[in-house]
Each structure stands twice: as structure tokens, then as C-alpha cells.
């Protein structure tokens, strides 16, 4: 069992070391000459008014959550499609049930108006 996962764990450890090395090198080797102009936030070269007075709509967060749910669905569909023949009819029925639950959720979200962007 260890021999199966050892290369994967080694890869994650090596990737973590590389990332930490970049952060440490950037901290010690990078130039540090802050000025008030450099510390000002900007968006595409323009001054940003900031988001202090702007309230985000709940629909924004709801759409983001729905996106994550259906994005995860795509990941499950990919894995299922790769193992389709090995899973047989049990896998087919399970996936149809999974998709049915997601379609019911999508229809519910559409009927509630969760995906409409009116102000």
C-alpha cells in the first residue's frame, strides 16, 4: 500500500518545497521600496474606489455555489465515463440517479429565479 502512494506523496512534498522556496526567495531577494503610490490599490491602471460602500448581491454567491456544484458534477461524470464498462448496469443506474437529483436541483434553482441577474 505504501509503495502505491509513495510517489504521489513524494511529488506533493516536492511541490510544497518548491512553492515554499519561491516564497522565501521572493521575500529575501525581492526589492523593497514601498511608496504611497505603490501601496494604493488599482484596477487596470485606474484608481479603485474600493468596495466599502458596495453591497454584493446574494445572487452572486448563489450563482457561485451552483457553479461549484455543477462543476463537481462534471468531475464525477468524467471519472464515471472512464470506468463505464467496468461499472456495468449498476454504475449506469447509479449515475442516472445522480444526474436525476442534479436535474431536479437545477430545475428548482431555475424556478426560484436563482440564475437571473436583474437588479
Image: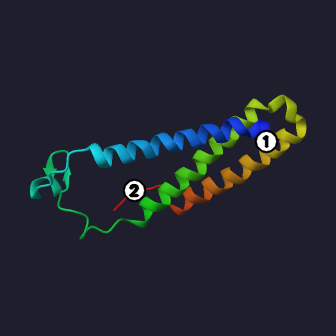
Which circle's residue, 1 or 2, is located before the other in the chain? 1
Disc 1 packing (10 Å; few <14; some 14–19; many ≥20): few
45 shown above or below 110: above
What residue lies at 55% left-to-right and 51% top-to-bottom?
A: 68
Instruction: Looking at this view, name the residue that lies furthest to the front.
Output: 28
Give percent across and percent down for residue 105: 64, 57
Give percent across and percent down for residue 59: 44, 62
Give percent across and percent down for residue 39: 17, 57
19 shown above or below 108: above
- The Cα atoms of the two marked residues, 1 and 2, are separated by 51 Å
The residue that mark 2 highlights is 117
- Secondary element at image label 2: loop
- Secondary element at image label 1: helix
What residue lies at 74% left-to-right and 40% top-to-bottom?
A: 5
- Residue 114 shows in the view: no
Give the label, 1 or 2, closer to the camera: 1
In the rendered view, does 49 fall on the left or right side of 7? left
Q: Is the C-beta separation of discs 1 and 2 under 8 Å?
A: no
- Residue 51 shows in the view: yes
In the rendered view, does 75 fall on the left or right side of 54? right
Which quadrant of the rendered structure holds the C terminus? bottom left
What residue lies at 32% left-to-right and 44% top-to-bottom?
A: 26
The residue that mark 1 highlights is 2
In the rendered view, does 5 fall on the left or right side of 69? right
Amino acid at each position: 500500500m505504501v509503495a502505491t502512494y509513495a510517489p504521489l506523496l513524494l511529488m506533493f512534498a516536492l511541490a510544497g518545497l518548491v512553492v515554499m522556496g519561491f516564497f522565501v526567495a521572493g521575500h529575501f531577494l525581492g526589492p523593497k521600496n514601498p511608496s504611497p503610490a505603490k501601496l494604493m490599490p488599482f484596477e487596470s491602471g485606474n484608481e479603485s474606489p474600493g468596495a466599502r460602500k458596495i453591497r454584493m448581491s446574494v445572487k452572486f454567491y448563489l450563482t457561485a455555489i451552483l457553479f461549484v456544484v455543477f462543476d463537481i458534477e462534471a468531475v464525477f461524470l468524467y471519472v464515471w465515463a472512464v470506468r463505464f464498462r467496468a461499472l456495468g448496469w449498476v454504475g449506469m443506474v447509479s449515475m442516472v440517479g445522480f444526474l436525476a437529483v442534479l436535474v431536479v436541483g437545477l430545475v428548482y434553482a431555475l424556478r426560484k429565479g436563482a440564475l437571473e441577474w436583474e437588479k
